[in-house]
Amino acid sequence: MTDGSADPTALLAVAEAAADAVVPRLAASRDRAVGVDTKSTGTDMVTEFDRWSERTLVAALREARPLDGFLGEEGASEDGSSGVVWVIDPIDGTTNFLYDLPGYSVSIAARLDGTVVAGLVHDPIRDERFLATIDGGATRNGGPIRASGKDDLATALVATGFSYDPDRRRAQAAVLVDVISHIRDVRRFGGAALDLCALACGRVDAYYERGLGVWDTAAGALIATEAGAVIADHQPDGGAFVGAAPGIAGPFAELVERAGAHAA
């Protein structure tokens, strides 16, 4: 049953209040190597900060909206009865967080009856908050943002990421060798959520990656789309994700498909 009070703007306000409960600590923490474990591989790390952030976000969201469901990277899973499910990545880019590098964020999306209608990504290092609601545009720290006006693939700056699985990494490196010869350059920043926000505000002209979870892209994909980027392929449960500025969206999608990005 859908909750009639689930207005995207109201949901976004709830997400902002939840993010405010975790961002200051994530920005200020210095002793980050606390309770470090691994997940899918020996390089796929999770820290006690990830778990604390998810617990805190879920508690804040549940207090505001007790009938909603949850889907979190670190195990939060609850169906709810309102039609709203909160898709949470408590620290997207944990490796960067652990090494005190930029490129990690908090990502919160509200999914209503299967459609993401509100999204928040907060970068604690730059203190930048990216927000979007469906059909409502996207902002960074309150100001509107737009994808770049790039129309020449050969001069496009592209973001990407790599799997934690060694065999998949080797395949992705082979794809990169092909892609990089047709563009300006490649950047590997950290988490997918901020890569998508970089696409949304024109810091990069395109982004592709494979092997992402739904929590990696739920908020960022909405933000990028509302900023005018074109998502050519979105398979959030481990498949391909391809997005670009509108002027190069078609040629870029063809390039990564020819290079084998959908299989690597």
Image (tube, rainbow, N blue to C red):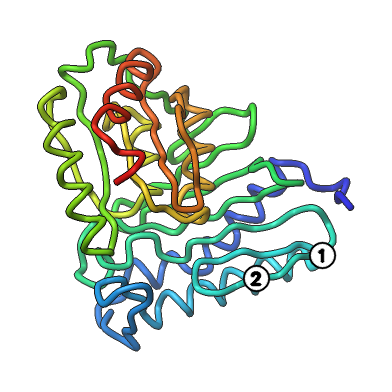
Q: Residue 149's spot in the image, x, y percent?
A: 32, 14
Q: Is residue 111 above or below residue 224?
A: below
Under mark 1, the amino acid is Leu
Q: Is residue 127 above or below residue 31?
A: above
Q: Can you tell which quarter of the image residue 251 is in?
A: top left
Task: From the image, tell me which residue sits under label 1.
Answer: 67
Q: Residue 210's spot in the image, x, y percent?
A: 36, 47
Cα–Cα gap, marks 1 and 2: 13 Å
Residue count near mark 1 (Cα–Cα under 10 Å), binned few <14, some 14–19, many ≥20:
some
**Residue at the spot x=64%, y=69% of the render?**
60
The reply to whether discs 1 and 2 touch (Cβ–Cβ < 8 Å) is no
Under mark 2, the amino acid is Ser
165 relative position to 21: left or right: left
Q: Which mark is residue 182?
A: none
6 relative position to 60: left or right: right
Residue count near mark 2 (Cα–Cα under 10 Å), binned few <14, some 14–19, many ≥20:
some
Q: Which mark is residue 77?
A: 2
Q: Can you tell which quarter of the image residue 72 is in?
A: bottom right
**Residue at the spot x=16%, y=36% of the render?**
186
Which sits in the foreground, 1 or 202?
A: 1
**Residue at the spot x=56%, y=37% of the render?**
132
* Element type where label 2 sits in the image: strand
235 relative position to 113: left or right: left
Which sits in the foreground, 75 or 200?
A: 75
